Protein backbone atom coordinates (compact mmCIF):
# COMPACT_ATOMS: atom_id res chain seq x y z
CA UNK A 1 0.00 0.00 0.00
CA UNK A 2 1.33 3.41 -0.99
CA UNK A 3 0.58 5.34 2.19
CA UNK A 4 -0.49 8.73 0.72
CA UNK A 5 -3.10 6.84 -1.30
CA UNK A 6 -4.49 5.00 1.71
CA UNK A 7 -7.97 5.98 2.76
CA UNK A 8 -8.50 7.90 5.95
CA UNK A 9 -11.48 9.39 7.74
CA UNK A 10 -11.75 13.13 8.34
CA UNK A 11 -14.85 14.81 9.77
CA UNK A 12 -17.42 12.47 8.25
CA UNK A 13 -15.65 11.79 4.94
CA UNK A 14 -13.50 8.95 3.65
CA UNK A 15 -10.72 10.25 1.42
CA UNK A 16 -7.11 9.56 0.36
CA UNK A 17 -4.66 10.51 3.08
CA UNK A 18 -2.83 12.91 0.74
CA UNK A 19 -6.08 14.85 0.24
CA UNK A 20 -7.04 15.13 3.91
CA UNK A 21 -6.60 18.76 5.00
CA UNK A 22 -7.36 20.67 8.19
CA UNK A 23 -7.40 24.38 9.01
CA UNK A 24 -4.26 26.02 10.40
CA UNK A 25 -6.54 27.26 13.18
CA UNK A 26 -7.29 23.73 14.33
CA UNK A 27 -6.60 23.64 18.06
CA UNK A 28 -4.73 20.37 17.59
CA UNK A 29 -2.26 22.24 15.36
CA UNK A 30 -2.16 25.46 17.41
CA UNK A 31 -2.22 24.08 20.98
CA UNK A 32 -1.89 20.30 20.79
CA UNK A 33 -5.41 20.38 22.28
CA UNK A 34 -6.65 16.86 21.60
CA UNK A 35 -6.60 13.17 22.47
CA UNK A 36 -5.48 10.18 20.40
CA UNK A 37 -5.45 6.40 20.38
CA UNK A 38 -3.42 3.67 18.68
CA UNK A 39 -5.05 0.25 18.36
CA UNK A 40 -3.25 -2.80 16.95
CA UNK A 41 -5.15 -5.10 14.60
CA UNK A 42 -4.22 -8.76 14.16
CA UNK A 43 -5.80 -10.99 11.51
CA UNK A 44 -8.13 -8.05 10.79
CA UNK A 45 -9.42 -8.02 14.38
CA UNK A 46 -8.78 -5.05 16.65
CA UNK A 47 -7.01 -6.19 19.81
CA UNK A 48 -8.62 -5.03 23.09
CA UNK A 49 -10.66 -2.34 21.35
CA UNK A 50 -12.93 -1.94 24.39
CA UNK A 51 -9.93 -1.15 26.57
CA UNK A 52 -8.70 1.46 24.08
CA UNK A 53 -12.19 2.99 23.89
CA UNK A 54 -12.41 3.15 27.69
CA UNK A 55 -9.02 4.89 27.88
CA UNK A 56 -10.05 7.30 25.13
CA UNK A 57 -13.29 8.12 26.93
CA UNK A 58 -11.40 8.75 30.15
CA UNK A 59 -8.81 11.01 28.47
CA UNK A 60 -11.49 13.06 26.69
CA UNK A 61 -13.39 13.42 29.98
CA UNK A 62 -10.25 14.56 31.78
CA UNK A 63 -9.76 17.45 29.35
CA UNK A 64 -13.46 18.29 28.90
CA UNK A 65 -13.45 17.32 25.22
CA UNK A 66 -16.71 16.11 23.65
CA UNK A 67 -16.35 12.52 22.44
CA UNK A 68 -17.97 12.58 18.99
CA UNK A 69 -19.00 8.88 18.92
CA UNK A 70 -20.27 6.23 21.28
CA UNK A 71 -18.61 2.81 21.40
CA UNK A 72 -20.71 1.43 18.54
CA UNK A 73 -19.78 4.48 16.44
CA UNK A 74 -16.04 4.03 17.10
CA UNK A 75 -16.29 0.33 16.47
CA UNK A 76 -17.94 0.96 13.06
CA UNK A 77 -15.18 3.46 12.25
CA UNK A 78 -12.53 0.89 13.16
CA UNK A 79 -14.21 -1.75 10.94
CA UNK A 80 -14.33 0.77 8.08
CA UNK A 81 -10.60 1.46 8.47
CA UNK A 82 -9.71 -2.24 8.64
CA UNK A 83 -11.67 -2.97 5.43
CA UNK A 84 -10.16 -0.06 3.56
CA UNK A 85 -6.57 -0.85 4.56
CA UNK A 86 -7.08 -4.55 3.92
CA UNK A 87 -3.90 -5.90 5.54
CA UNK A 88 -4.08 -8.73 8.07
CA UNK A 89 -2.12 -6.76 10.68
CA UNK A 90 -2.65 -3.03 10.95
CA UNK A 91 -2.41 -0.26 13.43
CA UNK A 92 -5.20 2.19 13.71
CA UNK A 93 -4.58 5.77 14.74
CA UNK A 94 -7.25 8.30 15.56
CA UNK A 95 -7.31 11.70 17.13
CA UNK A 96 -9.97 14.15 18.16
CA UNK A 97 -9.14 17.81 18.72
CA UNK A 98 -11.15 20.68 20.11
CA UNK A 99 -11.82 21.91 16.59
CA UNK A 100 -11.22 25.09 14.60
CA UNK A 101 -11.63 28.44 16.35
CA UNK A 102 -10.09 31.90 16.75
CA UNK A 103 -6.80 31.49 18.60
CA UNK A 104 -7.66 31.82 22.27
CA UNK A 105 -6.55 29.53 25.08
CA UNK A 106 -9.93 28.99 26.76
CA UNK A 107 -12.30 26.44 25.21
CA UNK A 108 -14.32 27.84 22.28
CA UNK A 109 -18.11 27.64 22.61
CA UNK A 110 -20.09 25.50 20.18
CA UNK A 111 -17.11 24.38 18.09
CA UNK A 112 -17.38 20.86 16.69
CA UNK A 113 -14.35 18.63 17.31
CA UNK A 114 -12.05 17.62 14.46
CA UNK A 115 -12.07 13.84 14.01
CA UNK A 116 -9.29 12.12 12.08
CA UNK A 117 -8.57 8.39 11.74
CA UNK A 118 -6.31 6.23 9.59
CA UNK A 119 -4.97 2.69 9.46
CA UNK A 120 -1.51 1.56 8.34
CA UNK A 121 0.00 -1.87 7.76
CA UNK A 122 1.62 -3.12 10.96
CA UNK A 123 4.88 -5.04 10.91
CA UNK A 124 5.24 -6.88 14.17
CA UNK A 125 8.57 -6.64 16.04
CA UNK A 126 11.31 -8.43 14.11
CA UNK A 127 12.99 -11.65 15.11
CA UNK A 128 16.16 -9.63 15.71
CA UNK A 129 14.37 -7.27 18.13
CA UNK A 130 12.89 -10.23 20.00
CA UNK A 131 16.09 -12.25 20.11
CA UNK A 132 18.72 -9.53 20.43
CA UNK A 133 16.70 -7.06 22.50
CA UNK A 134 16.79 -3.27 22.60
CA UNK A 135 19.20 -0.65 23.92
CA UNK A 136 17.92 2.03 26.27
CA UNK A 137 19.32 5.08 28.02
CA UNK A 138 18.18 6.70 31.26
CA UNK A 139 16.82 10.24 31.31
CA UNK A 140 15.13 12.60 33.77
CA UNK A 141 11.39 12.71 33.09
CA UNK A 142 10.72 16.29 32.03
CA UNK A 143 7.11 15.88 30.93
CA UNK A 144 4.06 17.50 32.53
CA UNK A 145 2.22 16.07 35.54
CA UNK A 146 -0.73 14.54 33.63
CA UNK A 147 1.02 11.78 31.73
CA UNK A 148 -2.11 9.64 32.34
CA UNK A 149 -3.90 11.65 29.62
CA UNK A 150 -3.24 10.43 26.08
CA UNK A 151 -2.78 13.91 24.74
CA UNK A 152 -1.59 14.84 21.24
CA UNK A 153 0.77 17.35 22.93
CA UNK A 154 3.74 15.03 22.55
CA UNK A 155 6.73 17.38 22.65
CA UNK A 156 8.01 15.71 25.82
CA UNK A 157 7.91 12.32 24.10
CA UNK A 158 9.52 13.74 20.94
CA UNK A 159 12.45 15.20 22.89
CA UNK A 160 12.86 12.03 24.95
CA UNK A 161 12.92 9.77 21.89
CA UNK A 162 15.31 12.12 20.09
CA UNK A 163 17.62 11.85 23.12
CA UNK A 164 17.52 8.06 22.72
CA UNK A 165 18.26 8.31 18.99
CA UNK A 166 21.19 10.65 19.57
CA UNK A 167 22.56 8.16 22.10
CA UNK A 168 22.20 5.26 19.62
CA UNK A 169 19.43 3.74 21.70
CA UNK A 170 15.92 2.51 20.93
CA UNK A 171 14.13 4.01 23.93
CA UNK A 172 14.61 6.10 27.07
CA UNK A 173 13.90 4.88 30.59
CA UNK A 174 12.62 7.95 32.42
CA UNK A 175 12.90 8.77 36.11
CA UNK A 176 11.00 11.45 37.99
CA UNK A 177 12.64 12.49 41.25
CA UNK A 178 14.71 9.33 40.98
CA UNK A 179 11.76 6.92 40.53
CA UNK A 180 11.01 4.94 37.39
CA UNK A 181 8.11 6.23 35.30
CA UNK A 182 8.07 4.91 31.70
CA UNK A 183 9.60 5.15 28.24
CA UNK A 184 8.93 7.90 25.69
CA UNK A 185 6.08 5.83 24.25
CA UNK A 186 6.10 2.60 26.24
CA UNK A 187 5.55 1.18 29.70
CA UNK A 188 8.51 -0.32 31.58
CA UNK A 189 8.74 -3.63 33.41
CA UNK A 190 11.49 -4.68 35.80
CA UNK A 191 12.19 -8.28 36.79
CA UNK A 192 13.82 -8.96 40.15
CA UNK A 193 14.18 -12.48 41.57
CA UNK A 194 11.54 -13.80 39.18
CA UNK A 195 8.96 -11.12 40.08
CA UNK A 196 7.69 -8.66 37.47
CA UNK A 197 7.50 -5.14 38.91
CA UNK A 198 5.73 -2.15 37.36
CA UNK A 199 5.40 1.46 38.55
CA UNK A 200 1.98 2.44 39.94
CA UNK A 201 -0.79 3.56 37.56
CA UNK A 202 -0.91 7.16 38.66
CA UNK A 203 -0.76 10.52 36.90
CA UNK A 204 2.94 10.12 36.14
CA UNK A 205 2.51 7.40 33.53
CA UNK A 206 0.15 6.54 30.72
CA UNK A 207 -1.59 3.31 31.58
CA UNK A 208 -0.83 1.32 28.46
CA UNK A 209 -3.45 -1.16 27.33
CA UNK A 210 -0.62 -3.64 27.63
CA UNK A 211 -0.23 -2.76 31.31
CA UNK A 212 -3.35 -4.71 32.24
CA UNK A 213 -2.59 -7.31 29.58
CA UNK A 214 0.88 -8.07 30.94
CA UNK A 215 -0.56 -8.30 34.47
CA UNK A 216 -2.96 -10.95 33.07
CA UNK A 217 -0.11 -12.75 31.29
CA UNK A 218 1.80 -12.87 34.59
CA UNK A 219 -1.24 -14.48 36.15
CA UNK A 220 -1.61 -16.94 33.28
CA UNK A 221 2.07 -17.96 33.44
CA UNK A 222 2.30 -18.12 37.24
CA UNK A 223 4.74 -15.19 37.33
CA UNK A 224 4.58 -13.07 40.52
CA UNK A 225 3.58 -9.47 39.75
CA UNK A 226 3.99 -6.44 41.98
CA UNK A 227 3.39 -2.72 41.68
CA UNK A 228 5.89 -0.44 43.40
CA UNK A 229 8.10 2.58 42.94
CA UNK A 230 11.60 1.69 41.83
CA UNK A 231 14.69 3.83 42.28
CA UNK A 232 17.17 4.28 39.47
CA UNK A 233 19.78 2.09 41.24
CA UNK A 234 17.22 -0.71 41.55
CA UNK A 235 16.42 -0.54 37.85
CA UNK A 236 20.10 -0.55 36.96
CA UNK A 237 20.67 -3.62 39.11
CA UNK A 238 17.62 -5.60 37.97
CA UNK A 239 17.68 -9.07 36.35
CA UNK A 240 15.57 -8.14 33.33
CA UNK A 241 14.01 -5.03 31.87
CA UNK A 242 11.21 -4.99 29.28
CA UNK A 243 8.99 -2.49 27.54
CA UNK A 244 5.48 -2.77 26.16
CA UNK A 245 3.46 -0.76 23.67
CA UNK A 246 0.85 -1.36 21.00
CA UNK A 247 3.43 -1.44 18.21
CA UNK A 248 6.42 -2.93 20.05
CA UNK A 249 4.25 -5.44 21.92
CA UNK A 250 6.67 -6.75 24.57
CA UNK A 251 10.42 -6.48 24.00
CA UNK A 252 13.47 -7.01 26.20
CA UNK A 253 15.91 -4.20 26.96
CA UNK A 254 19.39 -5.69 27.15
CA UNK A 255 21.57 -2.65 27.73
CA UNK A 256 20.94 0.45 29.82
CA UNK A 257 23.33 3.37 29.40
CA UNK A 258 25.64 1.00 27.53
CA UNK A 259 25.85 -1.54 30.38
CA UNK A 260 24.27 -5.01 30.26
CA UNK A 261 20.95 -5.49 32.03
CA UNK A 262 21.27 -8.75 33.98
CA UNK A 263 22.96 -11.25 31.67
CA UNK A 264 22.82 -8.79 28.76
CA UNK A 265 20.53 -11.22 26.92
CA UNK A 266 16.72 -11.50 26.80
CA UNK A 267 15.84 -13.28 30.05
CA UNK A 268 13.62 -16.24 30.96
CA UNK A 269 10.73 -14.12 32.28
CA UNK A 270 10.67 -12.20 29.01
CA UNK A 271 10.68 -15.54 27.17
CA UNK A 272 7.66 -16.77 29.12
CA UNK A 273 5.67 -13.54 28.70
CA UNK A 274 6.54 -13.27 24.99
CA UNK A 275 5.31 -16.82 24.39
CA UNK A 276 2.06 -16.07 26.25
CA UNK A 277 1.68 -12.80 24.30
CA UNK A 278 2.13 -14.59 20.97
CA UNK A 279 -0.32 -17.30 22.00
CA UNK A 280 -2.98 -14.66 22.80
CA UNK A 281 -2.46 -13.11 19.34
CA UNK A 282 -2.58 -16.49 17.59
CA UNK A 283 -5.90 -17.18 19.33
CA UNK A 284 -7.38 -14.32 17.25
CA UNK A 285 -6.79 -16.28 14.05
CA UNK A 286 -9.94 -17.95 12.66
N1 LIG B 1 3.32 5.21 27.80
C1 LIG B 1 3.36 6.16 26.85
C2 LIG B 1 3.86 7.51 27.20
C3 LIG B 1 2.92 5.86 25.55
O1 LIG B 1 2.94 6.82 24.60
C4 LIG B 1 2.49 4.55 25.24
C5 LIG B 1 2.07 4.18 23.85
N2 LIG B 1 0.94 4.87 23.44
C6 LIG B 1 2.45 3.61 26.27
C7 LIG B 1 2.88 3.96 27.54
C8 LIG B 1 1.96 2.20 26.02
O2 LIG B 1 0.59 2.18 25.82
P1 LIG B 1 -0.12 1.02 24.94
O3 LIG B 1 0.25 -0.28 25.58
O4 LIG B 1 -1.55 1.31 25.02
O5 LIG B 1 0.43 1.17 23.56
Image: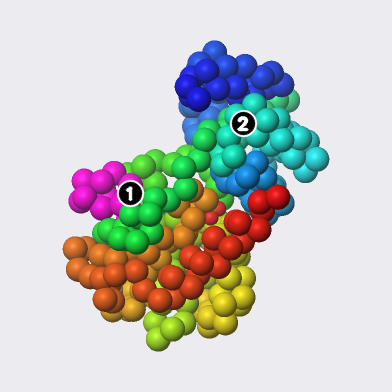
Please state which of residues 255 and 43 is positioned toward the viewer in this rendering: 43
Rendered residue at 25%/65% (across/down): 255
Rendered residue at 20%/68% (across/down): 259
Residue carrying label 1: 160
Label 2's element? Answer: loop
Please state which of the two labelled residues, at mark 2 or mark 1, is closer to the viewer. Answer: 2
Rendered residue at 57%/77% (across/down): 221
Residue 276 in view (yes/no): yes
The answer to whether 280 is drawn above or below residue 120 in the figure is: below
Q: Magenta region: which residues?
A: 160-172
The answer to whether 71 is drawn above or below residue 95 in the figure is: below
Name which of mark 2 and mark 1 comes first in the sequence. Answer: 2
Rendered residue at 46%/82% (across/down): 195
Please state which of residues 49 and 233 is positioned toward the viewer in this rendering: 49
Q: Position of residue 64 (x, y in %)?
A: 67, 42
Q: Position of residue 278 (x, y in %)?
A: 54, 60
Residue carrying label 2: 86
Please state which of residues 147 and 211 is positioned toward the viewer in this rendering: 211
Label 1's element? Answer: helix
Residue lying furthest top in this view?
19
Amino acid sequence: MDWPQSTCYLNGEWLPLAEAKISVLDRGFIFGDGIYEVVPVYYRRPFRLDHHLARFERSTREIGLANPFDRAGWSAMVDGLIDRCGDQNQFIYWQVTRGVAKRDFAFPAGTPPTVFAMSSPFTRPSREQREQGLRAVTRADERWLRCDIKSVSLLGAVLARQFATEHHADEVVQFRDGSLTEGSSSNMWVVRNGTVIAPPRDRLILEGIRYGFVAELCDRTGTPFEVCRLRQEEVKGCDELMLTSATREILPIVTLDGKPVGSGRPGPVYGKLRAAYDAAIEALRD
